[in-house]
Structures are given as C-alpha cells and as structure tokens.
Image (cartoon, rainbow, N blue to C red):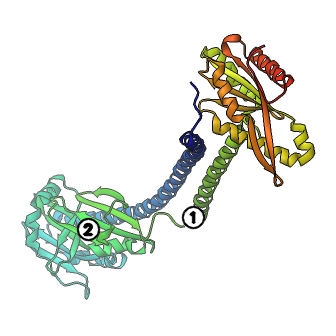
Amino acid sequence: MWQKPDMHDKALRYEAHDRQEKSQILLALLQALLITACLLLITYTLFDGWRERLVERGRQAGRTELLGIRKNLFLLMGNQEMFTALFGQRLEESLAAGLDVNLSELASYLTYLEHTHPSFAFATITRESVLTDSYFRQGLHAFDFDVETLVHYEEHIGYTLQMQDVTLDGPLQGENGTSYLVSRYALHDPDGLWGLLTLHFDFKQVLNEAGVEEVGEDYRVFFTFVHGSDKESFDWGDATTSNEEAVVMDLSYSLLKWRMQIVPTDSWIEFSLPLFLYGIVSTLVCIAIGVFIYLYQIKFQIFKTRSRTDSMTGLLNRREFEILLHQTCISGEPFAVALIDIDNFKEINDVHGHLNGDKALLSLVGNLKQHIRMSDALARFGGDEFILLFHGCTRVDFCKRLFQDIAHTRVDLDGEQVEVVISMGVVLSDEHSQAQALVKIADRRLYQAKQDGKGRICTSG
C-alpha cells in the first residue's frame, strides 16, 4: 500500500544521491592514485637502474685504481725477488770458490739498489739464526732489527731452505715499530746449505713506490698485509675505508697476503645532470598524468551521468527509462506505469514566458520527487510529459492516491501564483508483457484523461 513519503524519506534520497557522487569521486581518485603509483614505480625502477649503472661505473674506476697499484706492487716484488736471487747467486759463487762471504762483495749492487728502490733498508746474512754480516743504507737507517726474531718464522724459513727458492714475506716488525717486507734466499755451498741472505724493505716506502699516495683525492684507500701465521699485520691508509661501499681486492704473492680496499671520498656517483633531470621531470610527468586521469574520470562520470539524464531537470531521460522499463518487464515483478502531462502548458509559456515555463516544470518535478518512494523511477518523457515507474504496484488505487497529492502544484511566476495542473494515464504490468505496449496504453489513457476535461487520471480504456 502506497504511503506519502515523509521528510525522512527525502533525507534518505538526498543522502543516497550524495553518497553516489562521493563514491564516483573517490573511485576516480583511487584509479588516478593507482595509475600514478604504478608509473612512479616504473620511473623509480628505471631511475634506480640508471643510478646503479653509474655506481658500477664509479666502482669500476675504483677497481682500475687498485689494479694499477696491484700491477706496480707485483713489479716491485718481482724486482726484489730478482735482486735477492742475483745477490744470492753472487755469494754462492764465493762459497763455491771456498771464500768467506760478506756483503761488501755486493757493495756496488746494493748501492744500485739503494738508488733505484728507496724502500730498501738493509741486508743481512744469517747462519743458524745468527747474524754473520749486514749492510745498511748510510744515514737513513739504524740497525734496529733483532735477527733473533727470525726464529718466529722458522716454518717459512724452513720452507725456503727446502725449496731452494726466493720468498717474499712480511710484515716483519722492527724494534722501533717499523714494518719490513723481507725477501730471502737460501745460500748453498758445495757441502750443502750454508745460510740465508735476507733483503729488508720498508713497507711504507714500498707502498709509496707502488704509487699508493698518488691515488686521486676522490678516493680513500686502506691496505692490510697479513703474515702467513695471521698473527701480525701491517695496515696502511684510512681504516674507515672498510665498509660495505668499498671495492675489495684480495691478493697474494709468495708468502705475502694482503687486502686492498678503496672507497670514494663522497660517493661512487658524480653529480649527473641527466639523471637529476630525469628524476624531477619523470616524477612531475607521472603526477601530471595522475591529475589528468583524475580529471578525465570526473569528466567521464559527468558525461556518463548527463547521457543518462535530462539536462534541465536531472531526471532520467526517455532512453534510459525505456531500458529500465524493459528490464523490469523481464524480471516479472509487478509494477505500474503512469504517464503525466501538464495541462495548458503552452498558455503558461505564452503568458509568462519560456523561462517561467521552465520554472513551472521544475516546480512540478520537485513536487513529484517529494511524493514518490525511493524505489520508484521518474523520467522526463519529452516536453512537458513525465513518466513514472512504480515498483511492486498491483492496484490502480495506489496511483489514484498519489495523483490526488500531485495533481495541483502552485508556483510563483513573477509575483503571480499560478496553478500547474496535470493529467495522468496509468497502466498495470499485468495488462501487457511488452514495455512499448505498456507505454502506448498509458499514452492513450493520458489522452483520454485530457479529453474528459483535463486534471484527471485515467486507469482504463
């Protein structure tokens, strides 16, 4: 049974309409944010890949620096082994001739070594861990090395004696804390092993000769030389270099092991204007695309709404109503269709003007909205005609009671109270199964209501 909608029903209707508009705006915003986030993710991935390539380029430059030092170190160590072998062979010649060996025989060789290798400190000949002879760089070094320390390296010395080869070992600590790179050669006479020739090189000077101090100001380096026993080491450089950003190179030579590390003073990446511009521009473009999509979605929703509604009244247009009516017929639910027309609407336009005629139409629409249920559908059918779909209506009495409330609408037109009177034609769904046929029946009954004197409702015929 139909009841006149109260203020609560009107509030619910307006609230539902407001929720629909807000949901459309929220949906458009979420779509825009999702697309923007995806674009930003792609942009960041490309940016990060570009940045990683620049980082790798910087790290490769660091490796190049280390490789240069490594090459120089290998050349120096090879020379030191070569000098030790040459001196040892010269001394063995004296031993083979039955002469007492001493380093004075090698004075010219050692003097040459002093001039060509500033890192050379001194040379010794030991026999059974006892110093037999020594040679020092005049004025540059004092004999501060305890030869008995060699006992601590018996394993390596034994290896050297067994292999009868030149070895490079270190770090070997002097009494004043100086670290030495030690090159050894086992001396043999016709009777067998005779002693050990050792050349000592200042570790710091060796690194300087290798060009460590010539590393550019853009880098910080750190070297750790570890003795084979891992009990003694020699560190050179900035210890803070040891971190996750460092390029690390582990190397070994003879009995010597070392680790080289290098990091940039600031960052592996120098300032890249293209990368910076890409980050800024691509971010702005992604945001701009997001805003464009948001505005487009809002515009699309507005266009979609306007394509379904009448531009002046905001009601469903005829096409959308016919679609709704057709769907309702298919559903099989009972309903009623009422076609409404304003009586003498042409006179209102002629006397009061078309603007006031539109005002009269809108006043009627407002009155209709106040008296129908939220489940009912109202559409502008054309001109001053409107059509209603009453869901669940099975009796014409329902429509008659509604007609009594909406048949007369008073509106103020230029200070004059004008009464807008309507006629209505009603048809129930059980009278026909086709939507178009039902509309024709309602139109015929509307025409009959006008013929009978206007301001009437016709439900049969």
92, above or below 352, in the image: below
Q: Which mark is residue 446?
A: none
C-alpha separation, residue under disc 2 versus residue under disc 1: 55 Å
Is residue 71 visible from the viewing direction of this image? yes
Q: Nearer the viewer, residue 63 or 298?
A: 298
Which residue is under mark 1?
272
Quarter of the picture containing the C terminus is: top right
Task: Find out whether the residues at labels 2 and 1 contact each other: C-beta distance under 8 Å.
Answer: no
* Front residue of this view, candidates 56 and 186: 56
Closer to the eye: label 2 or 1: 1
| Amino acid found under the numbered disc labelled 1 | Ser
Q: Position of residue 187 (x, y in %)?
A: 17, 62
- Name the residue nearer the viewer: 298 or 11: 11
Q: Earlier in the sequence, mark 2 or mark 1?
A: 2
Label 1: state its secondary structure.
Answer: loop
- Number of other residues with Cα within 10 Å of mark 1, as a class: few under 14, some 14 to 19, many 20 or more: few
Q: How many marks?
A: 2
47 sits to left or right of 64: right
Establish if 405 lies above or below 288.
above
Seen as rendered, the residue at the extreme front is 453
Query: To which residue does mark 2 refer?
Result: 87
Residue at 29%, 70% in the rendered image: 239
Residue under the point 46% across and 58% down: 60
On screen, residue 419 above or below 49: above
- Element type at mark 2: helix
Q: How packed is label 2: few (under 14 Cα within 10 Å), some, or many (20 or more)?
A: many
| Quadrant containing the N terminus in the rendered view | top right
Residue 307 picture location, percent across and down: 74, 36
Above or below: residue 215 compared with residue 452: below
